[in-house]
Image (tube, rainbow, N blue to C red):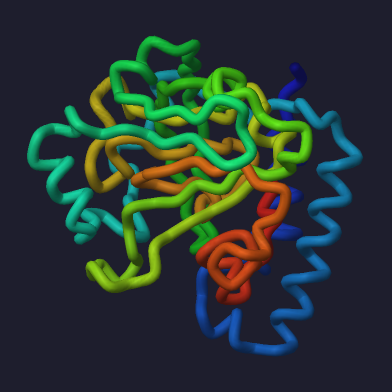
Amino acid sequence: MTAIRPDRRHLLLAGGALALSGCDRLVRNAEAQCTVKKAEQVSKRTQRALARDALAPEYQEKDISKDFRANGSVDPADAEYVALKANGFRDYRLIVDGLVETPLALSLTDLRRMPSRTQITKHDCVEGWTSIGKWKGARLSAVLDRARLKPEAKYVVFHCFDALDQTEEGDRYYESIDIPEAYHEQSILAYEMNDEILPIRHGAPIRLRLERQLGYKMAKYIKRIEAVESFAHIGRGKGGYWEDRGYEWYAGI
């Protein structure tokens, strides 16, 4: 695979990521929303014109950020999650279902036994900050291969334990990506960060890493992966928690 050159990455980020900002004021502004959509369309067309399997840049150990910020949820209040955390996630099972031939319930041990990938990459947040971290996790492609996707599956949806208002009653976070992105070499279900067990604040027991996407696409605290033909019936039908609130579904950089 070829790497996306840093200058190209920065160009795409400048053209599209600013418009994808996590600022609610931007989302509520009609003129800004128009700019968001146009920038998103340009970014999507640009990346589709590049090699579909191009790699995001990877870095060296010396480049790892000393303080990798945690944003969004940092300790879910979901009762099931609290119970799982109390016993060190020994009873955790990742459910993989939907349009699959073989539904799965995978423990952390199961995930650690699957083909894995380690990568040191930059996290680009829509709020304008970046951090570099080292991630190790099961290849998402390996998980989906074991589940055996049905031909009609077009997307995978990540259902999470967390609600951004940190309450038991809040809307649960979710995200989605298309099948080609799910099978990208750098798409992993991370269970380690910087050679240690993934911290709670960064999404334990597993989180999604999509190194060619902006940070809000990288779901934390994943409970279930669902293969679907359409996500119109999930949440408000836009493909993700923030997408339901005005963000663009495509967040490639």
Residue 108 visible, this angle: yes
Residue drawn at 34 percent across, 28 percent down? 191
For image coordinates 58% across by 36% down, the residue present is: 211
**Screen quadrant of the N terminus:** top right
Residue 173: percent from left, percent from top: 43, 60
Q: Establish if 239 lies above or below 141.
A: below
Query: What x and y, as percent, mark residue 251?
Result: 66, 53
The answer to whether 1 is drawn above or below residue 152 in the figure is above
x then y, percent, for residue 69: 33, 50
Q: Does any portion of residue 18 appear in the rendered image?
A: no
Q: Nearer the viewer, residue 24 or 80?
A: 80
Q: Is residue 8 left or right of residue 87?
A: right
Relative side of 1 to 201, left or right: right
Report the residue at 80% width, 54% height from top. Answer: 43
Question: Of 233 and 110, which appears nearest the observer?
Answer: 233
Left or right: residue 73 versus residue 54 is left
Q: Residue 28, position in %: x, y? A: 59, 87
Using the rendered view, name the quadrant where residue 132 is placed. Answer: top left
**Residue furthest front in the image:** 101
In the picture, measured across the screen, residue 108 lies left or right of residue 125, that is left
- Depth check: give the residue in front, 139 or 131: 139
Identified at 57% across, 63% down, the residue is 234
Q: How many marks?
A: 0
* Residue furthest to the right: 49
Rendered image quadrant of residue 131: top left
